[in-house]
Amino acid sequence: MLFSIAVTALGLLSPPEVLLVVGPSSHPPGTHEVAKTATILQEALNRPLAGTGLASRIVTDFPKIETEFDGVRTVVFLGDLFPLTRLPSQVENMEMMQRLVDRGVGVVCIHYATGGEGIHTRNGDHPLLRWVGGYFANPGSAHHESVARIFPTAKIERSEPDHPVSRGWSTFVINDEPYIRNWFGPEGRREEVKVFAASMLPPEAPNLEPVAWGIQRQDGGRGFAVVMPHFVQNWQNDDLRTLILNGIVWTARREIPADGFRTAKPRSELTPAVG
């Protein structure tokens, strides 16, 4: 009995956590759906047979007390623009996240949570450059403008076939809004970023555009960003889902199996079709 209490006190019975932060979103039904996305990810990560050794927790506000992050291995952000710039107490949020990053906690941004509007300087500097390697520069940004556009047949291909994030998924074609012309900082910095998935876009003037990328940070932590999915129904795509779940598990510094982090399709009520 005493041993059990001691083990619990040391946290040895609690698996490392993935914290899912749901920020504000005003998109119409069927698009973004950040609350449903958090549930989809939580159900996949918490499934006993998944084998990640991780638990997950959903929050709609960013904790203000550092001990509330005890056991958190990585933080996943969902929302319109990077949520910590839109939730109350922006300055305190960013300072807290920097302290977490300094101790090696992972950072993941999905779709519009990669949006860096609001706190970057005129030359494009932003914490997301250091936390995940790059971001979506909103139209109107002084330094650079990324592009958000629906592509009915975007072909998504692996760029780092030998990397753990690339395990278990293959080239796929998707009707979605993978942002292009994302911002990775000044020339000479790009080699720090690993591009996991890319697409030749736009069709009328193709360029190889990164749509999922990551970094191994100097603090020992990892960052991952993916600019899909816009349509919540696309979580039904096995290859896209495996790519994203691999990225989350990788930032949590857990081993990804040889065939990738494969999960059952989400419940249909979580992924309604648009229209």
Image (tube, helix red, strand yellow):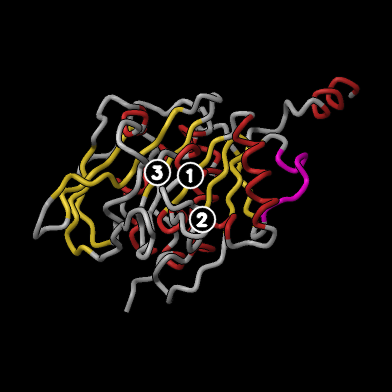
Which of the numbered marks, if any, corresponds to residue 67? none
Label 1: which residue? 128
Q: Amino acid at mark 3?
A: Gly
Mark closer to the chain start, 2 or 1: 2
Identify which residue is drawn at 41% across, 65% down. 271
Q: Please rate how many residues cluster around mark 1, counting C-alpha atoms within 10 Å: few if below 14, some from 14 to 19, many from 20.
A: many
Query: In this orientation, does residue 166 appear?
Result: no
* Identity of the residue furthest to the top in this view: 3
| SS of the residue under disc 3 | loop
Q: Position of residue 17 (x, y in %)?
A: 62, 38
Identify which residue is drawn at 44% across, 73% down. 27
| SS of the residue under disc 1 | helix
Question: Looking at the image, do the residues carrying marks 2 and 1 touch, with CB atoms under 8 Å apart?
Answer: yes
The image shows residue 206, relative to residue 28, as above or below, that is above
Mark closer to the chain start, 1 or 3: 1
Q: Amino acid at mark 1?
A: Leu
Q: Depth check: give the residue in front, 231 or 262.
A: 231
Question: Looking at the image, do the residues carrying marks 1 and 3 touch, with CB atoms under 8 Å apart?
Answer: yes
Mark closer to the chain start, 3 or 2: 2
In magenta segment, residue 63: yes
The image shows residue 86, relative to residue 105, as above or below, that is below
Label 3: which residue? 134
Which of the numbered marks, if any, corresponds to residue 82? 2
Q: CA distance from mark 2 to mark 1?
A: 9 Å
Q: Depth check: give the residue in front, 267 or 141.
A: 141
| SS of the residue under disc 2 | loop
Q: Depth check: give the residue in front, 275 or 124.
A: 124
Identify which residue is drawn at 18% across, 44% down. 208
Within the image, what quadrant is residue 138 found in?
bottom left
Query: For the magenta stretch, what is the residue range?
Result: 62-69
